Amino acid sequence: MNAKEVIARRVALEFRDGDVVNLGFGIPNYSADFIPEGVNVILQAENGALRFGETPTEENYNPNLANSGGAPITLLPGAATFDIQTSFAIIRGGHVDATVLGALEVSQDASIANWLIPGKFAPGMGGAMDLLVGAKRVIAAIQHVDKNGNSKVLKECSLPLSAKGVVSRVITELAVFDFQDGKYLLREVAPGVTVEEVLEKTEGDVIVADDVTTMPI
């Protein structure tokens, strides 16, 4: 399993029966392929769909159905489609139980930066600003280090923030973190990964929970 699949599989275990969950670009949308059997989660695409499923195959691909990132989706029985205004009314009205968003950086005060690298073109923050304050629970799905091996799980974000103090849980290919007393709280480590390795690759301050477990992926 590569890093993205590890994160996507672990993200899918956060889905709760009956919840409305919004998935962001990239790894979050990938997690739709790994919904546990028997979990009836209602996935929302912010461009205007409720109850979509896994990535289509050549046999069931429909070019008119796509998620917010433009990637093809399948609609499940009972699905609804609507305009983007209605979609954002759902988000801003507090009807989204959880959102899973990718991130460039997270910080130990539960802040997230996920939209802009100075000097690089960005079309805008998009729906993240609404989701980060409108969803009841925010899960950040992020690769633990960048291509140069530098931690993206930081004491303080260096990039422009998308929102401050809103993240509930951070899931990387190495670990699962919650937050406690202004620090990361290490809850899980990936199979084959040690607590020491996680601490070495995490720039932020970490409290190690007494009952750290292995990711059930």
Image (cartoon, rainbow, N blue to C red):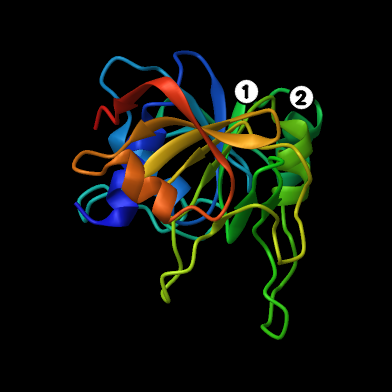
Left or right of residue 113, residue 184 in this image:
left
Left or right of residue 168, residue 191 in this image:
left
To which residue does mark 1 refer?
A: 97
Q: Position of residue 210 (x, y in %)?
A: 42, 19
At a point 29% along the width and 49% down the height, the residue shown is 5
Q: CA distance from mark 2 to mark 1?
A: 8 Å
Q: Position of residue 88 (x, y in %)?
A: 75, 39
In terms of image quadrants, where is residue 123? bottom right
At a point 21% along the width and 38% down the height, the residue shown is 191
The answer to whether residue 1 is visible is yes
Q: State which quarter of the image contains the C terminus.
A: top left
Q: Nearer the viewer, residue 174 or 75?
A: 174
Rendered image: mark on residue 94:
2
Q: Position of residue 172 (x, y in %)?
A: 42, 47
Q: Residues within 10 Å of mark 2 (few under 14, many from 20)?
A: some
Q: Give the residue type at disc 1.
A: Asp
The answer to whether residue 50 is visible is no
At a point 71% along the width and 86% down the height, the residue shown is 119
Q: Residues within 10 Å of mark 1 (few under 14, many from 20)?
A: some
Label 1, secondary structure: give it: loop
Q: Above or below — where is 139 with respect to 201? A: above
Label 2, secondary structure: give it: loop
Q: Give the residue type at disc 2.
A: Gly
Q: Above or below — where is 36 with respect to 66? A: above
